[in-house]
């Protein structure tokens, strides 16, 4: 067992204080808890993580719910989650169908999240406090892609911000790996994200571009 | 969906966490102008809005701050420099604010941010957490701020973009090249092409900004776990709208 501490600004650009007021409805809490892998994992989300205080956006559970709200409602026509539509629409479905258990840990600061197989995804402090709200949705999609059967298959290119030569990259855009899913989600969020601001959409663009530039062994040849 | 256990209490102990809330991430040590400070906090806060009115509220906050943009510039830059290195999101939000204000006088500050040394990676063992990546996102956002100034005819901005077409970080080079190609004058574009040819970096000219509809899309149905029960989510406006 580890114990961690974190100081959280109430008013910052992450979006949490606004999303927090929205998700504090029992209908959302029930839907997110039962849909995105929280159910069955109460013990993990207790003891300061927010199970008994799920509207408090200083705490991890509400911040995870905020990511779930962005994942669920950022497409204008959010009820359409057909795989023939954009990933902005079906990203929530893909997460729903691939993450059975979502568990929280302090972590050691070296990862945002990890896919452990058999539908289990672990999220660490950085997921709640370093990522903005849409960034958490991106992380859930990235890890879901690993659950969906796509490990990383290449080393990062020379000069990559993620560490040139290290494993953990995808070979190409066409490999359709976790980096492609995450970048494509951010791209659609930038282009058509609903119920958000141009600032968070611009942040999605900047992060998506850096992923495109640095997380593929072969650069896709385009940018956002 | 596979069978799920109920929320069975643990025999062991999971991790625990303690959180402490503060009002906002800034210190404003160098600014005693409470009204201006509040406008900056509000604009940053509104960046993260949600709901149908989120963008309107963000724009209103920017408009209010814009009325004192000249005073705000110095305070924003001072706050950026005062923030701890690891406050990546907060540092980014101030750079985004500089970009939004479109102040020609902000060009030197944006250039300093782009030029500043990127600290060594602090998450060496990770493939998804990267402090260098966070630093680069801050700098490419500063490049976007310079591009916006170039778009409005600020000559210094075009010079900055040309300078960073030779930046050591690929994403900064790529963003600067694209920005100058899109907003520069013919002479700038000629100079840029000559520079890239000289450096053997003409591949940067081939990386195009395109619409998301024009790229290969993900085939989400592949490798998925067959859906069992699909529940529709509640309507998004059930919660109060904020933005």
Image: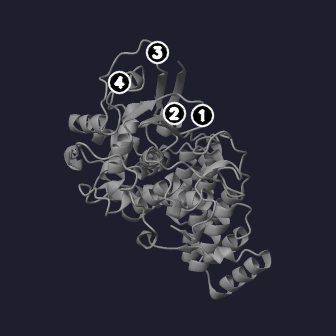
Residue A92 horizontal/vertical position (percent) = 34, 49
- Label 3 sits on a secondary structure element that is loop
Task: Specify the subunit that label 4 lies on.
Answer: A
Residue B90 in view: yes
Q: Name the foreground residue: A212 vs B157.
A: A212
- As drawn, is B17 to the left or to the right of B157? left
- Label 4 sits on a secondary structure element that is helix
Task: Specify the subunit that label 1 lies on.
Answer: A
Which mark's residue is nearer the viewer, 1 or 3? 3
Q: Which residue is mark 1?
A: A109
The residue depicted at 53 percent of the width and 39 percent of the height is A112
Task: Specify the subunit that label 2 lies on.
Answer: A
Determine which of the numbered discs, if any, sits on residue A171 in the image. Answer: none
The residue depicted at 64 percent of the width and 60 percent of the height is A217
Q: Which residue is mark 3?
A: B13
Residue A18 in view: no
Q: Which residue is mark 2?
A: A125
Marks 2 and 4, how far apart at CA: 17 Å
Q: Which residue is mark 4?
A: A42
Tell me if label 1 and label 4 are in contact, CB under 8 Å: no
Residue A46 horizontal/vertical position (percent) = 39, 22
Tell me if label 2 and label 1 are in contact, CB under 8 Å: yes
Q: Name the foreground residue: A216 vs A78.
A: A216
- Label 2 sits on a secondary structure element that is helix
Tell me if label 2 and label 4 are in contact, CB under 8 Å: no
Marks 1 and 3, how far apart at CA: 20 Å
**Of the residues under marks 2 and 1, which one precedes in the sequence?**
1
Few, some or many C-alpha atoms within 10 Å of disc 2 (few <14, some 14-19, many ≥20)? many
The residue depicted at 28 percent of the width and 60 percent of the height is A76
Which mark's residue is nearer the viewer, 3 or 2? 3
**Of the residues under marks 1 and 4, which one precedes in the sequence?**
4
């Amino acid at each position: 067992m580890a114990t961690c501490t974190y100081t959280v600004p109430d008013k910052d650009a992450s979006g949490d204080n606004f999303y927090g007021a929205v998700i504090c409805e029992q209908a959302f809490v029930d839907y997110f808890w039962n849909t995105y892998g929280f159910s069955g994992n109460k013990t993990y989300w207790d003891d300061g993580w927010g199970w008994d205080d799920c509207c408090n956006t200083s705490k991890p559970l509400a911040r995870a719910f905020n990511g779930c709200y962005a994942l669920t409602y950022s497409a204008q026509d959010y009820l359409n989650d057909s795989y023939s539509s954009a990933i902005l629409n079906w990203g929530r479905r893909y997460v729903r169908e691939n993450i059975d258990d979502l568990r929280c840990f302090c972590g050691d600061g070296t990862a945002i999240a990890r896919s452990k197989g058999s539908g289990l995804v672990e999220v660490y402090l950085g997921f709640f406090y370093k990522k903005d709200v849409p960034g958490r949705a991106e992380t859930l999609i990235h890890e879901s892609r690993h659950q969906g059967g796509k490990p990383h298959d290449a080393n990062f290119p020379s000069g990559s911000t993620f560490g040139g030569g290290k494993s953990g990259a995808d070979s190409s855009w066409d490999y359709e790996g976790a980096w492609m899913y995450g970048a494509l989600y951010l791209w659609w969020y930038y282009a058509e994200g609903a119920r958000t601001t141009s600032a968070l959409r611009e942040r999605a663009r900047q992060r998506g571009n850096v992923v495109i530039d640095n997380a593929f062994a072969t650069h896709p040849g385009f940018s956002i | 969906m596979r069978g799920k256990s109920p929320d069975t209490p643990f025999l062991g102990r999971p991790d625990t966490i303690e959180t402490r809330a503060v009002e906002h991430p800034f210190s404003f040590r160098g600014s005693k102008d409470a009204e201006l400070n509040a406008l900056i906090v509000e604009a940053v806060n509104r960046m993260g809005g949600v709901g149908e009115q989120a963008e309107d509220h963000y724009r209103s906050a920017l408009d209010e701050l814009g009325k004192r943009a000249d005073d705000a510039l110095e305070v924003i830059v001072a706050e950026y420099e005062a923030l701890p290195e690891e406050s990546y999101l907060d540092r980014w939000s101030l750079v985004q604010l500089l970009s939004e204000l479109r102040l020609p006088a902000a060009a030197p500050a944006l250039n300093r941010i782009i030029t500043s040394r990127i600290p060594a990676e602090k998450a060496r063992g990770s493939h998804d957490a990267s402090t260098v990546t966070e630093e680069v996102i801050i700098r490419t956002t500063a490049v976007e701020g310079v591009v916006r100034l170039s778009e409005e005819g600020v000559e210094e901005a075009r010079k900055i973009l040309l300078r960073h077409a030779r930046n050591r970080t690929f994403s900064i080079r790529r963003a600067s090249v694209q920005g100058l190609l899109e907003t520069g004058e013919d002479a700038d574009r000629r100079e840029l092409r000559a520079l890239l040819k000289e450096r053997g970096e003409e591949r940067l000219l081939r990386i195009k900004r395109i619409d998301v509809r024009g790229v290969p899309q993900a085939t989400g149905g592949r490798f998925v776990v067959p859906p069992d029960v699909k529940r529709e989510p509640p309507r998004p406006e059930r919660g109060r709208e904020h933005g």
